[in-house]
Structures are given as C-alpha cells and as structure tokens.
Image (cartoon, helix red, strand yellow):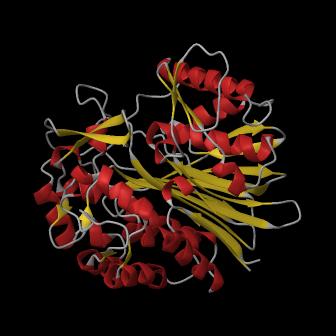
Amino acid sequence: MKGAVAAGHPLTAEVGARTLERGGNAVDACVAAGFASWVTESPLTGPGGGGFMLVHTARDRRTRVFDFFVAVPSGPLSEPEAVTVIFEGSQTQLFRIGPETCAIPGTTAGLEAAHRAHGSLPWQNLVRPAVELADGGFEVTERQAFLHRILAPMLATTPCSGLETGDRLVWPDLARTLERIARSGAAAIYTGDVARAMVRAVPAITAADLASYRVIRRRPLRSPYRGAEFVSNPPPSSGGVLIAYGLRRLEKPGRSGSPAAVALLARVMEEQTRARARRLTRALGEVGGTTHISVLDAAGNAAALSVSTGSGSNVVLPGTGVHMNNMLGEFDLAGTLPKPGERMMSMMSPSLVLVDGRPRLVVGSAGSSRLRGAVLQIVVNVLGHDLDVANAISAARVHLEGNVLHLEPPLEPGEVPYEVARWNERNLFFGGVSAVEQLPDGTLGAAGDPRRGGAGLVVV
C-alpha cells in the first residue's frame, strides 16, 4: 500500500491520492489536497484563512506542529454585521461577517513552510491540480448545496452563491491566484497585487501586518490513552488540551451507543466545559467552517491538516478569488482578543494516535465548538470500542451545549440532568471528521464524514 488519505470532499481526497500514487509523501499529499480544497470546499477554506498541520516523520519518530492560524491585525476594529445560520429546525448559530471580521490569513504560508521542511515533490506540481479544478470546474454535491444554502449570507459575493446540486462551480479568479502561488510561493499572498487588494478591502489589515506574518513551529501536546499516545495541537489552541482532558476520563467508555455510555460522554463534555471556564485554556471564538485532511504514506509518515475561513466573511478580494475569513467576528470585541500581531485562538485539533511510536490513527474534524467532541468520540470509537474508521465516523454522536444535550439518532441518554435535543438525522452540526488508520498488520483504512460528504481513499 502506498498510503491513505481522507478529506471533506471526494475530489480533495482524489488529489491527495494521486499525489501518493506519483511518489509523494504524506506532506506532499496533504499540501496538494489542501490547495484542492480551496476550490472543492471553498465555503470552508482558502487562502484567506488559517490553520494547523501536524506532521509525524517515521524516520526519527518525531511529531511537529506548524501553526499558521490567523493573527490579529493592527488597524482599528469596528462593529460587524450579524447573521444567523439555521442547521435544522430551531437549531441555529449566530455568525458575524464583513470587512470588520477579517484577521490576517496564514494558510498559504503554512502550506509553504510544511512543504519546505518535509515535502519531496516540486511545489508547482502540488498546486497544479487545484488550478485545473478552479478553471475546469466541478459539479456541486448535495452536501455542498446544503452548505451554500445555510451559509448564503457569507457567500453572496462568491461563485458559490445560489449554486444547487448538479450546478457547476468554476472560479477562474482563484485559478489565477493559485498560478501566482505556484510561481512565487506564499509571497503571492503577502506582497504585490493580492496584498494591496487585501489592505484596500480590510481597513484593519496593513501592509506591515502582512509582511510580519510568520509560521510558528510548536511541540505537540501528548497524553496517554488506553496504552496508546494521543498527540494533538498544543496551547494556545484549546482543542487538543480539552480532548486529552476528556480521554483521561474515558479509559472505560462503556458499551458503544448504550444510554450509560451516552450519559458518561455528556458528563465528560460538561467537565471539559468547566475546565475551559476555569481558564485552563484562554477564551475562544466559535469557528464555524473548518475542513480537515488526514494522510498516511507507505513509509509511516503522517500529516493532519485543519484549515478554516471561519464561516467566511462575504469579503472576496476583487480579481483574486481570495475569500477572507471572519475570525475576528467570532470573538467578543470588547476585550478577549489577543494583541495585534498575535495568534487568535482556535479549537482546531489535527491529531494523531501513536502505538509503540507508530501512527495508529490520524484524525481531525470540522465543526466549531463541536469538533473537539467529534475527535474525542472517534478516538474512543477506534481505541475503546474497536471500530474501524468508517464505522467510528458514521456512528451517532453526542454534543453538550450549555444545558442542552444534542443527540443523533438512535441514541438515548437515560436519566440525565440536561435538556435533551433529539436530531432527526445525522447533521454537519456534529462535525466533519476525516481519518485514516493503520492496523497492526499494516492494513490501511480511510474515511470521510458522511455528514459533510467526505471521502477516504486507500492507495495500493
């Protein structure tokens, strides 16, 4: 087997798989798939966002984190526009959009830094598939059309606006920006015409902000779980810390899907919320639109990429196809923001489970504050309930929000001290997980989340 890749869209996964077939390593595949996702998953990611990549190298069994999340700009901030997204029935979430919500993006710089450190194929080869997708277009899936509908206020200025299932999405402006990136690397975003367009469109971002942006390398967080080691995104990001905190309380997770197991998960999620409230982590924004890519290659290298534009700001830089993030809008502007130039905080949790120093599971998720619970439940399903990644991801999920316990069917919690919200079907509200696994005999598995139309491919 040459490797495995899982992503939030079949075309994203296909680009990663073709990269592995052509001799690329896990980072090559993750970078190429990451660029492709700018096109295929444009409501969720793109050059106007930020994220993290966790990289494990088999040669030295070291794991590193590339932090290229968005940073706070130095210009003055003002009140953004507020909109409401309806997921299902009365289940809603408030978002803020407009130029006032845009933070300094980092995704392009992060992909470049990871490729320089660990890539093996030429940079231009990794960008080219995304250019072809943006120019040639592709048919919108049912899941994408659903995203287009619920995120309509954030997408009004993008080519995604109004597109339904079977419509064709083409984005030539984004293709031209990708070509600039292929020629010039991340400098194409942080200098020149794109940078000038960004400064004009977003008053808070200055040319100096863009020139001073840097990718940060961090040591990952590590925590034991059932004889394995959980490795994830460290502070100031909060997701990994809270997942590790929860796993320590789920060494004995109970029978999968039973009322007792559901109630235990709910109690653990309540403890996580209390831990966060006690400032074990700093205050966080509720990032809405994230995507994740997981890759394992034949040599045992692993890469996990979580990236986001928030839910999108509805600010597209003219002539570039760069849709800016709305990360500033997800914070209380009265005082919880870090200082200008500093990283904003995130729940994104690209993660890895190691057994005897080798990757057993590579996993991450979309889903705002729900993504930490999604990753937690997948790790428990695989290591605690012995499910393969496909069944671990498709299994019904739980999420505790305040005093409301959200349940996908057919889960029942028994007697619990929460208000219970029973959903009619699986929903992207509960996250969008992409995961690959390696069994003790070397067999690989991969799966994307059906809630978001994801896909997994094993390359033989």
Task: Give the left or right position of residue 69, taking residue 350 as reference.
Answer: left
What residue is shown at x 35% (from left), y 70% (from top)? 186
Instruction: Classify residue 8 as left or right of residue 186.
Output: right
- Would you place residue 225 above or below residue 357 in this image? above
User: Which residue sits at x=37%, y=75%?
Assistant: 185
The N terminus sits in image quarter? bottom right
User: As drawn, which residue projects farthest toward the top?
Assistant: 417
Task: Give percent across and percent down for residue 78.
Answer: 13, 37
In the rendered view, does 246 fall on the left or right side of 256? left
Quadrant holding the C terminus: bottom right
Residue 26, horizontal then vertical, whole percent = 63, 70
Which corner quadrant of the image does residue 357 belong to? bottom right
* Res 8 visible: yes
**Relative height, residue 88 to residue 179 (above, below):** above
Residue 181, image quadrant: bottom left
Task: Give above or below for 341 relative to 33.
Answer: above
Which residue is nearer to you in this view: 410 or 416? 410
Residue 278 drawn at (x, y percent): 50, 17
Above or below: residue 37 compared with residue 214: below
Relative image position of residue 263 (x, y in whole percent): 67, 23
Q: Can residue 68 be seen by looking at this rendering?
A: no
Q: How many marks?
A: 0
Q: Nearer the viewer, residue 212 or 391?
A: 391
